[in-house]
Amino acid sequence: MVTTHCLTRGVRAGAQVPCSWSTTCEPYSAAHRRLRIRPGSQRRRWYTVAAADSGNSDFEDELEKATREAAEIHLKSAELAQQQTRRELELATETDKIDESLAEPSRGRSEDQIVQWSQETCTAVEEELHSYWISAGLRTTTAEALARSMVRTRSPYAMDLTLLHAKVERLQRTLPDSDVPKLLAAYPGLLTTEISAVVTSCIYLTTNFDPTSIPTMIEDAPQLLTLADQLNHRITKTLHAVQCLFPKASMDDIKSAIAEEPTLLLKIPEQVCVLVG
């Protein structure tokens, strides 16, 4: 038996109570509220667990739904990418056929095909080309001159802006450090040059000159990109011609001079050698 100083129902203060009784110094109402099981508390506890299980189920459903949507988006993106790649390959094939036909006169266009445009057609095509080159970044006068040149020569790319854009994009990927529209404005013949010829020309230029000078050389003389295998012959002859003119100059100095004046490669080096020697 112990003496408690707490107040319990039916026991006066200071009375001795059994040890099994509550010996805490809390009021009866607080102890009772904490120890007794309220009616419906078990039900609320079951509801809480059920709600938690329901929440987990909803989360799993949402996660599964999101995963399905992500998979569908991925498949759709892959399908669109394949279609885009297929379309680009088709356009590349068409541009290659055009360039090859122009490279071989026997497979080129007939005279009737060249002159069959009416004045109205020429005017409409020129306006469309002018707008396209403006959107490509050319100034108004430059875009107008390039559009007029394409119409005058009846460029096969003039009538189809989709093919024109595809060829410009291919050239830009081949010449990432160059402004292709400006190159085409300086030399429209580059537009109908085969991509393989452009790549070959770049290889010869990079092999013989400082790679950092190639973009400037191309900008000053875009015709170099159309020479392909002939370019290697011209480089060799031009180096020899300049060496004949300046026998004391080193080969590095000669290459640097040609890089600063790449139009020398477009001259006739054989005649220079004949005159010198």
Image: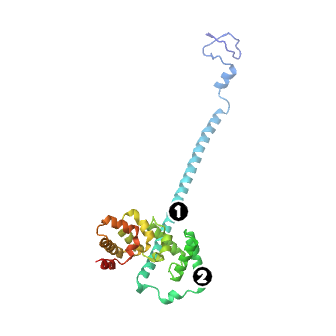
- Residue 178 lies, with reference to residue 110, above or below; the image says above
Provide the residue designation for mark 1.
Answer: 76
Marking on residue 123: 2
Sooner in the amino-acid sequence: mark 1 or mark 2: 1
Neighbor class of circle 1 (other Cα within 10 Å; few <14, some 14-19, many 20+) is few
Residue 182 percent across, percent down from the top left: 50, 70
Residue 252: in sight, yes or no? Answer: yes
Q: Nearer the viewer, residue 5 or 71?
A: 71
- What amino acid is found at the position of numbered circle 1 in the picture? Lys
Which of these two is toward me, 14 or 134?
A: 134
**Which type of secondary structure does the marked residue at label 2 adopt?**
helix
Q: Nearer the viewer, mark 1 or mark 2?
A: 2
The N terminus, quarter of image: top right
**Kind of residue at disc 2:** Thr
Residue 54 position by quadrant: top right
Q: Is residue 266 above or below residue 40?
A: below
Q: Residue 110 location, x and y as percent?
A: 47, 88
Find residue 269 and report its horizontal and vertical position in percent: 34, 77
Say if residue 87 shows up in the picture. no
Question: Alpha carbon of mark 1 to alpha carbon of mark 2: how far?
Answer: 42 Å
In the rendered image, which quarter is residue 243 located in? bottom left
Looking at this view, name the residue that lies furthest to the bottom. Answer: 112
Q: Please state if 244 lies on the left or on the right of 98 as rendered.
A: left
- Residue at 56% x, 70% y is 139
Residue 262, given in percent of the width and then of the height, sits at 40, 70
Disc 2 crowd, CA 10 A, few/some/many (<14, 14-19, 20+): some
Label 1 with label 2: CB-CB less than 8 Å: no
- Dot 1: what SS? helix
The quadrant holding residue 241 is: bottom left
Instruction: Please say which color scheme the image uses.
Output: rainbow
